[in-house]
């Protein structure tokens, strides 16, 4: 995938410009849909109440706050369906599962129950795609725009690199769709590997 982007020219967007540009394109995804690849195992999400509770070590509160978002996500995915497209995600999961990812998988499970189409892959599934380092975070909207999502050194969202080269977009979508097609359904993975995990230990992350 990196090679598909290496020959294309992208425009670096700072955070506010990236969010505005993303929103302008998102609801026009059309039949090609929205495809996302998540590779990093840890992010920071300040401002998200459930993440903030998780980061404070309040695991029960974090899970309750996720559950309280069900109505929001039901409305959100109905709106997506009304606009005629689907939201598809490939989530790379390393073992052992990081504290952040344990939290995120609970959120992704709720999203899946409300309409998102998520599959899980492991490191073996992407090994041939990472000869020179980890894959980037990628979001593809329809056939017209691809974003390489940029984070700072602490895992905070910092902006994106926008690509509009149709060949690069098509190749990256093909790779993500192939991973999605061979990945494990999130509900299956969650029941097998996540549901029985104890609350994550957070003290070392806040030290």
Image: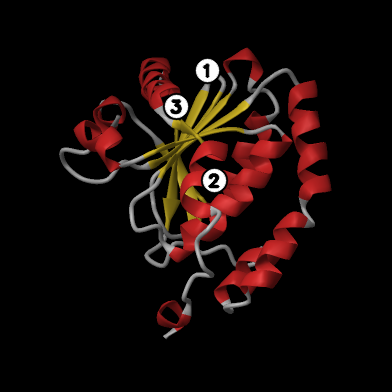
Does residue 199 sit above or below 18 in this rendering?
A: below
State the image coordinates of residue 121 (x, y, percent, origin top left). Answer: 38, 37
Does residue 100 sit above or below 7 in this rendering?
A: below
Which residue is outermost to the left?
Answer: 131
Label whose residue precedes the other's in the sequence (1 or 2): 1
Q: Nearer the viewer, residue 24 or 35?
A: 35
Element on which disc 1 rests: loop
Task: Please identify, in this view, whether the residue under mark 1 or under mark 3 is nearer the observer.
Answer: 3
Checking the image for residue 5, the label placed there is: none
Q: Which residue is mark 1?
A: 143
Q: Which residue is mark 2?
A: 191
Label whose residue precedes the other's in the sequence (2 or 3): 3
Q: CA distance from mark 1 to mark 3?
A: 18 Å
Q: Nearer the viewer, residue 107 or 136?
A: 107
Residue shown at 69% from the left, 38% from the top: 113
Residue shown at 26% from the left, 31% from the top: 6
State the image coordinates of residue 199 (x, y, percent, origin top left). Answer: 54, 70
Q: Which residue is mark 3?
A: 180
State the image coordinates of residue 73 (x, y, percent, origin top left). Answer: 76, 43
Is residue 183 visible in the rendered image? The answer is yes
Circle 3 Cα neighbour tier, 10 Å, few/some/many (<14 / 14–19 / ≥20): many
Label whose residue precedes the other's in the sequence (1 or 3): 1
Q: Quadrant of the C terminus?
A: bottom left
Q: Nearer the viewer, residue 11 or 85?
A: 85
């Amino acid at each position: 995938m990196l090679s598909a982007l290496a020959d294309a020219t992208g425009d670096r967007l700072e955070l506010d410009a990236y969010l505005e540009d993303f929103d302008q394109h998102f609801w026009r995804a059309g039949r090609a849909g929205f495809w996302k690849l998540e590779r990093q195992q840890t992010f920071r999400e300040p401002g998200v109440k459930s993440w903030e509770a998780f980061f404070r070590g309040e695991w029960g509160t974090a899970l309750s706050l996720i559950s309280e978002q069900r109505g929001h996500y039901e409305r959100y995915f109905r709106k997506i369906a009304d606009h005629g497209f689907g939201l598809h995600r490939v989530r790379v999961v390393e073992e052992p599962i990081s504290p952040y990812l344990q939290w995120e998988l609970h959120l992704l499970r709720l999203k899946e129950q409300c309409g998102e189409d998520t599959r899980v892959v492991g490191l073996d599934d992407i090994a041939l795609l990472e000869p020179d380092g980890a894959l980037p975070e990628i979001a593809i909207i329809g056939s017209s725009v691809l974003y390489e999502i940029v984070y700072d050194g602490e895992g905070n969202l910092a902006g994106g690199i926008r690509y509009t080269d149709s060949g690069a977009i098509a190749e990256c979508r093909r790779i993500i769709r192939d991973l999605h097609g061979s990945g494990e359904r999130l509900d299956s993975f969650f029941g097998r590997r996540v549901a029985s995990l104890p609350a994550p230990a957070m003290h070392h992350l806040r030290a």
